[in-house]
């Protein structure tokens, strides 16, 4: 990192003011922030402050971007990079928020050379080197512990796109094996698609069967929202995600639930 950027970030952190009540309320909403230790919460806060300083969050379609909207999006976006750093979101600056589902329009040419114009309702969308677009109505669905999280989903695509087209293969740190990653994800993806074809209930959003890129994004959602399901269903994928994100979300959640139980027991 350049000297100037380091200096600037230190200055932003020194002058940052985050509303304490709003911050606590935001952390309380999600299983993956409720279970954070105090030092992790402090690091997340710093990341959130820098994220909101370096990224622009704009409303579209009549959406007013209030402070609680900015914080909710930033907290969820930053949980992915808690132990990776903000530079994992380099190369783009804008988050666009619609009040609800939005219509994406695009053109493509099919295998027969026929051009199509498509309009599709979307809950979120990530552009390579461009903005992340999300529906606020869907952002509010997160935190239920059922695995659904549109912010984590779209920002996982951003990490995947750090090394080009999204393909479920983000750039891995030097201490991870590309072969282990590929073996874990390919095996789980094939198994998942087969189970969905047979109509079996897996506890993970069916949309993951769409492509290896969507499998990575949906499994990342589940890794943060319902990590015990991922660890139970696809332990090898859980291990790879835990090493990639450098977080043991299932262990953390289980420990914090034990802690809550113990508090209840002594009451
Ligand atoms: Zn996706």
Image (tube, helix red, strand yellow):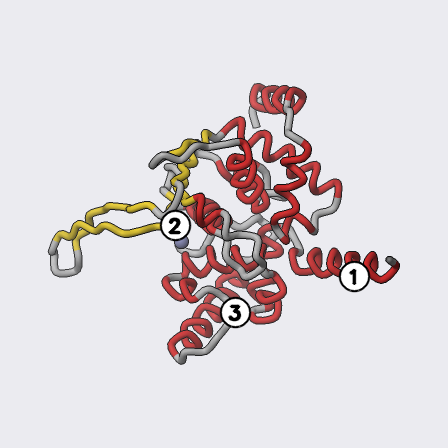
Give the total of numbered labels.
Answer: 3
For label 3, the crowd category at 10 Å Cα-Cα, with few meaning under 14, some 14 to 19 and many 20 or more, is few
Q: Secondary structure at mark 3?
A: loop
User: Could you tell me which quadrant the N terminus lies in?
Assistant: top right
3D distance between C-alphas at marks 1 and 2: 36 Å
Q: Residue at x 70, y 51 (%)?
A: 35
On whether ligand 1 comes within 8 Å of the CB at mark 3, the answer is no
Q: Is residue 233 above or below residue 134?
A: below
Residue designated by label 1: 261
Q: Residue at x 41, y 58 (%)?
A: 214
The residue lying toward the viewer, choosing from 198 and 165, is: 198
Q: Is residue 34 left or right of residue 114?
A: right
Among all residues in the image, which is located at the extreme right?
Answer: 266
Q: Secondary structure at mark 1?
A: helix
Among all residues in the image, which is located at the extreme front?
Answer: 267
The residue lying toward the viewer, choosing from 22 and 72, is: 22
Q: Earlier in the sequence, mark 1 or mark 2?
A: 2
The disc placed on residue 168 is: none
Q: Are marks 2 and 3 in contact (CB under 8 Å)?
A: no
Q: Position of residue 90 (x, y in %)?
A: 48, 35
User: Could you tell me which quadrant the C terminus lies in?
Assistant: bottom right
For label 2, the crowd category at 10 Å Cα-Cα, with few meaning under 14, some 14 to 19 and many 20 or more, is many
Q: Position of residue 138 (x, y in %)?
A: 45, 50
The residue lying toward the viewer, choosing from 69 and 226, is: 69
Q: Is residue 213 left or right of residue 72?
A: left
Residue designated by label 2: 123
Residue designated by label 3: 203
């Amino acid at each position: 990192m350049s000297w100037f950027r380091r200096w600037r970030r230190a200055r932003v952190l020194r002058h940052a003011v985050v509303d304490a009540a709003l911050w606590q309320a935001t952390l309380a909403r999600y299983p993956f922030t409720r279970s954070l230790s105090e030092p992790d919460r402090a690091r997340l806060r710093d990341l959130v402050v820098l994220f909101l300083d370096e990224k622009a969050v704009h409303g579209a379609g009549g959406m007013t971007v209030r402070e609680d909207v900015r914080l909710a999006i930033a907290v969820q976006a930053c949980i992915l990079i808690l132990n990776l750093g903000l530079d994992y979101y380099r190369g783009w600056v804008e988050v666009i928020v619609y009040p609800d589902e939005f219509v994406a329009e695009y053109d493509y040419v099919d295998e027969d050379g026929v051009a199509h114009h498509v309009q599709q309702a979307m809950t979120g969308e990530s552009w390579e080197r461009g903005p992340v677009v999300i529906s606020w109505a869907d952002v509010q669905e997160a935190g239920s512990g059922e695995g659904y999280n549109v912010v984590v989903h779209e920002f996982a695509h951003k990490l995947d796109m750090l090394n080009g087209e999204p393909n479920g293969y983000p750039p891995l740190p030097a201490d991870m094996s590309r072969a282990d990653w590929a073996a874990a994800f390919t095996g789980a993806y094939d198994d998942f698609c087969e189970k969905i074809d047979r109509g079996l209930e897996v506890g993970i959003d069916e949309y993951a069967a769409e492509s290896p890129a969507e499998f990575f994004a949906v499994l990342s959602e589940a890794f943060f929202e319902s990590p015990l399901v991922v660890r139970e269903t696809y332990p090898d994928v859980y291990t790879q995600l835990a090493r990639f994100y450098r977080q043991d979300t299932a262990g953390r959640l289980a420990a914090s639930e034990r802690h809550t139980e113990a508090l209840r027991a002594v009451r």
